[in-house]
Amino acid sequence: MAFEGETFELELIAKAFEAISKEISFEGLAKALLRVALEYSGAVRGAVLLSAEDGALAKADASFSREWTPVFASYPLVSEFRLPKELKERVLTYQQTVVRHDNRAGSALIDPVQCYSECEITILCLPLIYRKQTIGVLYLESKREQEAFPRKFVSVMSMLASQTAVSFASVQLFETLRETSMWMVRGQQIGRMGSYRWNTRTLLLRASCECYRIFDIDRDVNPVPFEVFRSRVHPVDLPILERAIEDALSTKSPFKHEYRVVHQGGTTLHVVAVGQFDFSPSGDLELEGIISDVTEQKVAEQALADAQTELARAARLASLGELAGSIIHEVCQPLTGIIASAEACLRWLGRDPTKLDETRKSIVRIIEQGCRATSIVTSLRSLVRDGQLQFAKVKIHEAIEEVLLLSKRELERADITLRTDLDRSAPDIEADRVQLQQVIANLVRNSIDAMTDIDGRARVLTVSSKVVGGHASVAVIDTGPGIDPPIRERLFDALYTTKGEGLGLGLSICQKIISAHRGRLWVETNRERGTTFGFAVPIRQSANVSKTN
């Protein structure tokens, strides 16, 4: 019978060890140890205090209150756990197991509702030790009249305390892994990306939670058959995706592809999948990588593209407005002259006697102003058509000053200082005045744009003109960031632009106009900073060029 009793006790101890060892959380570990200790000892009250934060229970922390919250379990539930000073030193500092008799006033389990002075108790306080540090305390109370905590029981509790310390290390590792996994899951959720591993032999995928969300797959499907994955790919994108996978698989090269995923509810996501091939422990070739949900990025990019399109449209409308303003400015003058001359003509005709000489002069002025207006409109129209240039004598410095006057507001808005060095003694040149001014205006506008974002130094625009060797030359110099050589080589190509809203036509049209004048247009980087655009045209055109004098 004694043998049977010992066997039964060993079974209880074995179950106690099993109950403690299977716990995977600090709270579960503390509760399991307390439950086993109370059942095995028959104690009426007890508590387990476990330090899970830094792995060691400091001397000053051998109490439990609302200000300090380690892992704590008690029976019955109490509001505070406070070891008396003597117990604190012996158990925490010297790591001794203490059994002593006391009254309820000496209890570490403090509940202000109950009175502890009515009966005596026996206390067992045992340190939980891990790596030579006290990581917790097992505290039990039994009624004094009972034969409590014999040596044999204390030995068993010491073994359970050792098992608790071993389980403590496992729980620490599990908590670390769980915390790391939680960070990874949270990070994937925030980054909207999931990880996956696809076995090319079994055609099964293992994937993270975020992958399941991206592909709208039930979490119970694990691993995921490749057919389920295929069923979520947009039908239009599926053939291209499969070819990309086949190409990567045949060469074992890194994989990257963008496609769309369609949820069962109809929601469409844009995703980017990247990966590289590796061998599994079993020797199977697997594709491991990340799938990112870039739907929001695509929406933002589309919104940005729409905004840029709208801005470009607004810029074109603004340019049309400026062109219209130029046309109005140029045409209004001759029209005003026509009206004034016509009114004078009527006045002379109404005189008695009629002033025919003055009337004739008014009619001549009307004809002259009408021809001037026609010339302006024809010249402006030739900017957008391949019409013949209308050459006339032009004072180049006057043509430049008119352009700069029209650009005054733009220069002021951009906080640009204007400097001029114009040769006023230069002879008249033969040129299409309006088109030559269009070239000058375009170069000035480009220089203004180049200096708009310059900070920390002066923004200066210098325009000069001179005559050298039978050619009149004009230079437009800015203090902008300059132009890189690869870009400089393509500046005059049609449809090439460095501006987000540009059409790539301005400089190519300028090139065409200067070429039609038998001149040359160029660009060069300044020695210190900025860019110089210049052109030179002959003072006299050849005899076969149409002229209007």
Image (cartoon, helix red, strand yellow):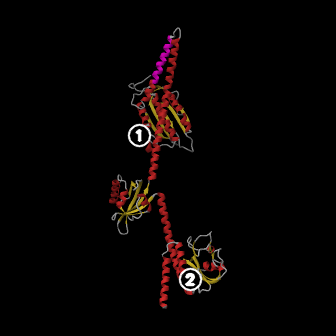
In the rendered structure, does residue 371 fall within the stretch colored magenta? yes
Q: Which label sits on residue 42?
A: 2
Q: Which residues are magenta?
A: 356-373
The residue at the point 46 percent across, 21 percent down is 370
Q: Secondary structure at mark 1?
A: loop
Q: Which label sits on residue 510?
A: none
Quadrant where the image shows the C terminus: top left
With 199 as the anchor, is 409 left or right in this view?
right
In the rendered structure, does residue 257 fall within the stretch colored magenta? no
Q: Is residue 138 above or below residue 298?
A: below
| Amino acid of disc 2 | Gly
Q: Secondary structure at mark 2?
A: loop
- State how far apart marks 2 and 1 are (Cα): 92 Å
Q: Which label sits on residue 495?
A: 1
The residue at the point 50 percent across, 71 percent down is 173
Mark 2 vs 1: CB contact within 8 A: no
What secondary structure do most residues of the magenta stretch adopt?
Answer: helix
Of tags 2 and 1, which is closer to the observer?
Answer: 2
User: Camera-side residue: 345 or 493?
Assistant: 345
Name which quarter of the figure residue 115 lies in: bottom right
